[in-house]
Image (cartoon, helix red, strand yellow):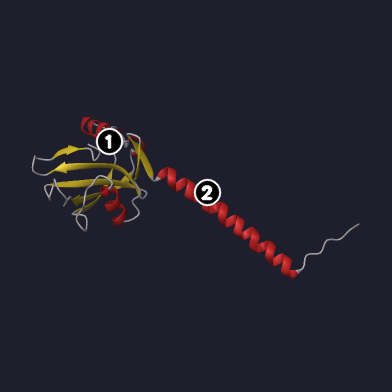
Amino acid sequence: MAAFFITKKLRKRLIVCLIGITVMISAFIVLSGIKEDDHIEYNGKSYSVRADSLEDHKRFALQFGLTLSTNPAMIQKVRIPEKFNKVYTDYNEMQKNSGFDLLPYCGQKCTLYTYEIISAPYNKTAVLNLIVFDNKIIGADICDTVSGGKMRSVFS
């Protein structure tokens, strides 16, 4: 019967290699999940919907050529209703046409961020509303403050 002995030096190298492999596999799994979850597809293009920070909100807006005010004009906790009335149904239709859908978030508490749009053609006559759940933008719209609150999709 043959005996196999591992020296301390070889044992340390094996442990370091196993830890390295574990870290690489974990990183791959985490990054793979982030890539899928942090983007939506619309008209053949991929858009980031990551919302870990206010800077992420600004990066989201820049994808559509929008420059936002430095800080949100308003931050508000909202709950997506369990059952949609006509207003929410119509609003969600606009969201669905933009690649979003609020139905999976029924009953969930979200955060609504409202920013002044400071870039042309709006120049502070409109706001960008972002609905955020679990550090992800799940809905967005532009509301024109001059035309009495007319809303439209960020993709229009």
Quarter of the image containing the N terminus?
bottom right
Quarter of the image containing the C terminus?
top left
Report the side of 13 relative to 141 (left or right): right
Residue 152, compared with residue 28, is above or below; it is: above
Which residue of the protein is positioned furthest toward the bottom in this rendering? Answer: 8
- Residue 54: mark: none
Instruction: Identify which residue is drawn at 52% across, 48% down.
Output: 29
- How far across and how far down the image is residue 137, in percent? 32, 45
Residue 150, compared with residue 16, is above or below; it is: above
Instruction: Identify which residue is drawn at 78% across, 65% down.
Output: 6
Report the side of 87 relative to 109 (left or right): left
Q: What residue does disc 1 label?
A: 95
User: What is the number of callouts on the image?
Assistant: 2
Report the side of 25 relative to 127 (left or right): right
Q: Earlier in the sequence, mark 1 or mark 2?
A: 2
| CA separation in Å, label 1 and label 2 | 30 Å
- How far across and how far down the image is residue 98, in percent? 29, 35
Residue 15, compared with residue 84, is above or below; it is: below
- How far across and how far down the image is residue 20, in percent? 60, 59
The amino acid at mark 1 is: Gln
Which residue of the protein is positioned furthest toward the right in this rendering? Answer: 1
- How far across and how far down the image is residue 7, in percent? 77, 68
> How many residues crowd around disc 1 within 10 Å: few (fewer than 14), some, or many (20 or more)?
many
The amino acid at mark 2 is: Ile
Q: Are marks 1 and 2 in contact (CB under 8 Å)?
A: no
Q: What residue does disc 2 label?
A: 29
> How many residues crowd around disc 2 within 10 Å: few (fewer than 14), some, or many (20 or more)?
few
Instruction: Identify which residue is drawn at 27% across, 36% down.
Output: 95
